[in-house]
Image (cartoon, grey):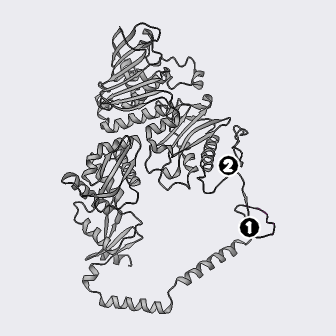
Amino acid sequence: MADIIHLLPDSVANQIAAGEVIQRPASVVKELMENAVDAQADSIELILKDSGKTLIKVNDNGLGMSDTDARLCFERHATSKITSVNDIFTLHTKGFRGEALASIAAIAQVELRTKKKDSEVGTQLLIEGSQCKEQSICQCEKGSSFAVKNLFFNVPARRNFLKSDNVEYNHILDEFLRIALVHPEINFSLFHNDKQEYKLGKSNLKQRIITIFGNSYKERLLPVFQESNLVNISGFIGKPECARKTRGEQYLFVNQRFIKHPYFHHAICSAMDELIPAKHFPTYFIYLEVDPSKIDINIHPTKTEVKFQEEKFIYSILLSSVKHSLGNFNLGSQQIDFDHVSPIDFSQIPLGGTPKNPFIATNPDYNPFSDKKQEAKPMYSPSPFPKKQQSEGAWTKIYESLKENLPQEADKEAIQQKIDTDDYEETDESIESVVFQIIHKYIVSRIKSGFMIIDQEAAQERILYEQYMHQLENKTMPVQKLLFPETLSFSPQDADTISHLLNDFLQLGFDIEAFGRNTFILNGLPSGLQTHNIQETMEQILETYKSNMLSLQLSRKNNLAHSLAKTLGVKKGQTLTHEEMQHIIQQLFSCQSPEISPSGKKICAIFSENEILQLFN
């Protein structure tokens, strides 16, 4: 029998490996910009066309490469960063495996122009599908220029899975900002379709944040700083009142590398648990410095997941540091004088040990007006009464409170008289119109064959969705002008999304216009729309819109109508008047699909008289 196992050609192996490293245009941007940073460049320029699908070009003024290095850098596992296994645990650079350029060259047309500082001429390479088509001498500036054209040109199936230009550009913007935020000492520029989107000059960290996210961040940021033998923490957190309903402004870095770490994110959120509303996300820009030998960054091809050797201790230090920063600026629940409080000391943490929970002694019977000396008692001290006595006392109190709320004899007679009158005087017509609300979530309506229960939130979502789709397809909704226009500020990604939806928002009655980068002026709202906080409402609409882009295959207009309906509709737990319930029922059954919401939820359930009778048989 002939042998059936054989080695794959390098071109095929590179295309398979590229699937792990290069997932979309943003992956190319990340790898090329990190290489430029490693090349000690102090000026990096990113040029895009069609959100990176047609062209991704990164120019830098770094060290440049020789002829041999320029050709060798596209080979798999060719790197200048490590020479032995031990070097992996002492890394201070962003790239080290030598996979990125080989993966990019396997699925795109790449042009490289590079020159070292002391060289008179540079080198030009043209590579297509891992094959070197041309290598020649050229004239170019010091540094390197990588141009990646027609990404996935030889893997059409992968190219078909790319999202819209707007989605892909937002992913690229994420990677661009992550690198720009960790290197404020470098000049960065971003051009998209021949338009300059960003020009970031050298600055300190706070100024870089303000330049990217807007001047409003001058007053929003609180510094965080803590040094210890395990980790050095620096950066900024946003004030609790600036927490938003949308994600996207949570940046965590370790050793100048952006990471995603849910455990440390939980530490930051826990420090602000009682200071921000539910389902809100704090803003933070936190930078960790850890001994490279204490972390492992080689567990994922994109290097955004990192393992920490002393994870629990770092969690505790991070939690305490954020709380200390909030308290130092009088944002905690109590006013604390930190001028007389020594800084947190983490120098004596035993490595490999388990920290003990602190013990707090309190006296629940303390009376500041009493002259008697009172001793502190441990918090949550056991009760002096036996369990049976505690239980009896508790039920006695509940029973007494219930007795107070029970109707008196006179009230009982009045209620019974009303029931009797209603039973005899109610006509068939009034029975048909009986509508009431239960547990503030469902509307119950009497019908001829029994009764119907309607989910008020799902029903309102269906009603509003069809109304908004009608407005988007046919005519413009009337605008109610605001007496005082409001200024709205968003993250760069959300601002870009709104810019693409401005005409659709106008059709729906939102008179909104751009006012500088990441800022918009709201001049009017749809007629009849009532909202107390338009900034929060718009953020919630955008969060739903972005979530739908990932989970649902909807067109732009469908997505926007669905997001508005889900955000602005009646919610569960909201008390409705009799007229509001009647209005919802009438509107629901004039819809094209009254039985199911746009989110796929069942709107109503009908119970016949026979089903009701069977419940008691």
Q: Is residue 7 visible?
A: no
Give 296 or 126, whichever is nearer the viewer. 126
What residue is disc 1 on? Answer: 368
Going from the N terminus, do you reach mark 2 or mark 1 first? 2
Count of numbered circles on the image: 2
Kindly identify the residue that appears in the image at 32 percent across and 61 percent down.
Answer: 529
Residue type indicated by callout 1 = Pro
Indicate yes or no whether the magenta region holds residue 42: no
In the rendered view, tell whether residue 394 sits above or below residue 68.
below
Residue type indicated by callout 2 = Phe
- Rendering quarter of residue 192: top left
The magenta stretch spans which residues?
A: 369-378
What residue is disc 2 on? Answer: 338
**Horizontal and vertical percent position of residue 150:** 30, 25
Give 172 or 525, whichever is nearer the viewer. 525
Kindly identify the residue that appears in the image at 50 percent across and 36 percent down.
Answer: 207
> In which quadrant of the rendered image does the N terminus lie?
top left
**Horizontal and vertical percent position of residue 532:** 40, 60
* Measured Cα–Cα span from mark 2 to mark 1: 24 Å
**Horizontal and vertical percent position of residue 122:** 40, 10
Q: Secondary structure at mark 2?
A: helix
The numbered mark at residue 450 is: none
- Rendering quarter of residue 604: bottom left
| Horizontal side of residue 357 vs 580, given as left or right | right
Kindly identify the residue that appears in the image at 34 percent across and 16 percent down.
Answer: 127
Labelled pair 2, 1 in contact (Cβ < 8 Å): no
Indicate yes or no whether the magenta region holds residue 370: yes
